[in-house]
Image (cartoon, rainbow, N blue to C red):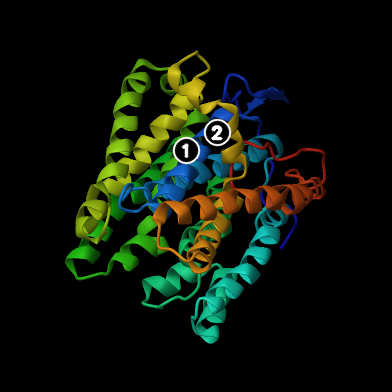
Amino acid sequence: MRRAVGMRQQAPARVRLASSGVEEGGRERLGYRPELNGLRGVAIAVVVAVHTFDWLFPGGALGVDVFFVLSGFLITTLLIEEWDRHGSIALRNFWARRALRLLPALAVFLVAGVVVGVAQGASPGRVLATAGLTAGYVINIARAAGFDEAGPFGHTWSLAIEEQFYLVWPLAFVALMRSRVTRTAVMVIVAVPIVLLPLWRTLLVDGGATYDRVKLAPDTRADVLLVGCLLALALASPLRARLIGSPVVRALTVPAVAFLAAWTALGDGPGSLRALALWAYTAIALSAAVLILAALDDRPGLLRQALTWGPLVHLGRISYGLYLWHLVTIAAARWALPTDNGVAVAILGVGSALVVTEASWRLLEQPALSRKGRFPADGGGAHQVPQSGVRK
């Protein structure tokens, strides 16, 4: 495959993605947005909470959906910015940057997960098989097909879905950009599966599909990522002026927060599978999109003030490592403590996760990120991927 894919096109009109973006070549880049890191910090906190006290936060799994929408939005924004600057996408460099971001921490996590899984008494063969499926980013497909995993790898299904997205979406994006369809038509093409997939999920549920089949498979969860893609496309179009800072978005922000909080408290277990399939996944994704729009509004407000709180921003910055490690350390805490006290397990497990995550960030992830400049988005220039809080 060539290093850069695509054909040079006429430079488009100026695109405004965020009012505090960085000027470059007459266009404005998204740049660093601490608010998005803060939103990611909220999402990872909710995920850790549900894995620690599932009875208290039964619907905390929606934090993963917030991750999906953010990933769709940020990756598509990067692709749009690169295409609008160069008329091409350096796909090999794109995938190399993803590998540098994800693989170093994942490799260490897999070794630790195997050790913990075997120490807890699981079959070494099944633990190794689960680790192999996780390393190949297909654990979600295996579990959706009925594979009974072993070891503290159950949460890595979402990483697999995102990696599948990183593989397929840039290719689809290039194909769409090289076609003769307008940007508006591209948005319509992306919107169609967002509308149709809830119907597909509902048909599967009515046909007896399992919870894992509906929750974990790429064909049933792609619409959540596509909501973020559609949002990025909309903000790179004249619709931006009607979205960021608009009275409608500002009016929807409080209901979006209230809905996400209520779902976190009420839960999304197997008993609510049809609701998840038909409308809840979509409602969660759209609510996350509203929060992204609210976060990109530079006017002072309570939400923006909360999302730019330093500790929360840092939590979002290290969220990938924390997502990897928290189940391993919680499992290790349950195995090590001579008590079933949930509070003690939470303190030791989550505290250990934060320590290990910080070490991973400083010793593994940051050094790997420092090498991303070898794989610039223009295929050879000095452009660097903006650190916008995306778990990449």
How many circles with numbers are drawn on the protein? 2
| In-image side of 74 versus 209 (left or right) | right
Residue 199, percent from left and from top: 24, 55
Residue sitting nearer the eye, 96 or 159: 159
- Residue 348 drawn above or below residue 127: above
Residue wearing tag 1: 42
Q: Judge whether residue 186 can be spotted in this image.
A: no
Q: Name the residue rendered at 56%, 57% in the picture.
A: 324
Residue under pointer 2: 312
Residue 257 horizontal/vertical position (percent): 34, 31
Say which residue appears at 39% left-offset and 64% top-offset. 217
Q: Are marks 1 and 2 in contact (CB under 8 Å)?
A: yes
Residue 351 visible = yes
Element assignment for label 1 = helix
Q: Amino acid at mark 1?
A: Val
Q: Amino acid at mark 2?
A: Leu
The 10 Å Cα crowd at callout 2, few under 14, some 14 to 19, many 20 or more, is: many
Disc number for residue 114? none
**Residue in the foreground of this view, choosing between 113 and 129:** 113
Taking 115 as reference, is 123 above or below it?
below
Residue under the image location 53 percent in, 79 percent down = 127
In the picture as drawn, the residue positioned furthest to the top comes out as 300
Tell whether 183 sits left or right of 258: right
SS at mark 2 in the image: helix
Between disc 1 and disc 2, whose residue precedes? 1
